[in-house]
Amino acid sequence: MPRETFQRELDQLVEEVVELGREVESSLGTMVEALQGQDGEIAKREIGVDSRFKERGAEIDEECMVLQARQAPVARDLRLVYTVQAVTNHLVRAGTLCEHICHAIVETGGADQDSDLSATLSEMARGARSLFGEGLDVFESRDIDRARDLEAADDKVDLLYSEAMNLVVNPNKEESGSPEWRVRAALMVHYLERIADHGVDVGGRTVFLVTGERMESAMRQYRERRIDSDED
């Protein structure tokens, strides 16, 4: 019976992490909408979410510590508890970055913008939100086959990052945007790249949870198995 109770508590813990992740994902969706329309009123909806996410993350972290102290989990259970703590950290940090971006949108409302850079930011935001959601899906489903696709998606975000930073440094002279907006845009580029990275890291933590291997090692072994299977 104690073991069954412990398993239920672990399952509940995972559900809480996924619920937090979906809340962050929803905030990212609002952030994308605000960024695409440069709508400060929409962005204001997410001002203050950072403290809520941090509070919820702290509660989950405390639950993890209580479980370890009370149940003395075995190796596999410890892997889950540690993964939950790591994933929660990635979710909270992505939520923090989301609020930073919303603040930037609000604070530069009405400022002149570089249309090319603005369009690249919007595309990058959509890619980062999508990648974050995919990483959370991998964690929820434990589908590590999908985890390998996260790095390819992240490569696309990285390309947009390079494109955006090039536009920041080398603006169109006829439409460069206000200096304040350009500074904020450069910060948003960095924040969006980090949100995408958090999505990849959530997938990587899931690979470790399922296989006990680090992301790089596990995916290399996966590819090698596929090659051997194809040859057979």
Image (cartoon, rainbow, N blue to C red):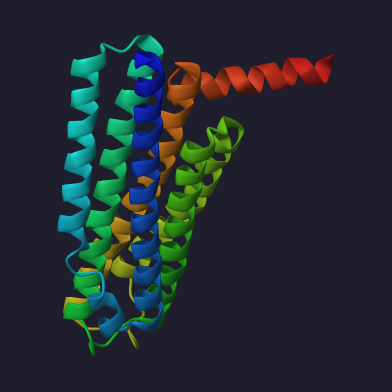
**Quarter of the image with the C terminus in it:** top right
- Dividing the image into 4 quarters, which one contains the N terminus? top left
Q: Can you name the residue that lies furthest to the front here?
A: 1
Q: Is residue 50 above or below residue 225?
A: below
Front residue of 73/173: it is 73
- From what the image shows, is residue 90 above or below residue 2? below
- Residue 186: percent from left, percent from top: 26, 64
Q: What percent of the width, then of the height, locates residue 140?
A: 48, 39
Q: Residue at x 46, y 52 (%)?
A: 133
Rendering coords of residue 91 (x, y %): 31, 46
Q: Name which residue lies at 44% across and 75% down.
A: 119
Does 203 appear above or below 160? above
Q: In this image, 125 relative to 62: left or right?
A: right
The residue at the point 34 percent across, 15 percent down is 2
Q: Residue at x 73, y 20 (%)?
A: 227
Q: In front here: 174 or 110?
A: 110
